Amino acid sequence: MDNPSKSARPDAISGKGIWFVPVWIGLGLVFYLLNLLAGSQIRSPYWFSELVLYALLLIGLWANRRYNIRKVISLPRQWAPVLYIFLVWLFGMLFEASLTVTGQGIGGVHPQTLASFILAQGDYLPLAIVSWWVIRKLHPAFSELYFFSAGISLTEGLIFTGALTAMILSPQFFLAPFGLAYYALAYSSFIALPLLIIDEGLLWDARQVKPYPVPLYWLLGFGIAILVRLFWGLVYSPLVARLFDLPPNILVVH
């Protein structure tokens, strides 16, 4: 049984208060634009694929607020989890195409394209599966999954690359809220975006679940992503590197 009252509530898509998703998207886009204008970063040949995802996110938000299209799209319940996981992977690969290590290879995990995409599967696929599991068990709406994605992103920004941590400790610390919003935007563009296409109620189990506060989704995303990234670094990456005889990697995580 679905929980229609939660799915249909006014803030299910946009959120409310300090968790108003369009504001977070706007802040993230400001940070992206500032980086783009700075022109100091090496770019992938397909750097614009990231913008495609952000455009889909904005169009999806508008279309659902106006036409509620995820409720209009007819989809068998048994196929909804498969489609969600596939879309997270597909959008994740599109985002990965916007990254590069050297400016020549495509992907942000390894300087060489093929190696980078092989290694990336150990991150994107587990994140897709655990995100589906969270949706099934906790029944988040899009706005809540957006901040679950933000929690996942913090493991990269604060720990594994430390880019956000470095920003907080730098003279440009005042840009940290924009950087945080950008990380949330980037990860939600593949983890949360499918819920603008798929009716989230099709992914829920039959239990009635009380709403959870948004900060809990931040913490849950952070904790789950730590486990996924430890699996990637300690198990998946060494295993596939040996299995496929991948060349040495100069980067640990993207």
Image (cartoon, grey):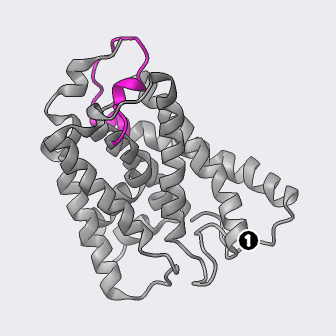
Please give the count of numbered marks on the rendered protein.
Answer: 1
Residue highlighted by disc 1: 249
Q: Is residue 172 visible?
A: no
Q: Picture coordinates of residue 15 (x, y %)?
A: 19, 40
Q: In the rendering, at what x and y percent does residue 234 appear? A: 73, 50
Residue interval drawn in magenta: 197-217
* 44 drawn magenta: no
Instruction: Tell me which secondary structure the magenta stretch mostly adopts.
Output: loop
Which residue is located at x 32 percent, y 57 percent?
Answer: 56
Residue 110 x, y percent position in the rendering: 67, 70
Q: Residue at left 67%, top 50%?
A: 232
The answer, for residue 84, to whether it is visible in the render is yes
Q: Is residue 252 left or right of residue 205?
A: right
Q: Is residue 24 above or below residue 63?
A: below
Three-letter amino acid code of the residue under disc 1: Asn
Which residue is drawn at the image coordinates 40% and 46% (left, top)?
149
* Residue located at (44% from left, 51% from top): 190
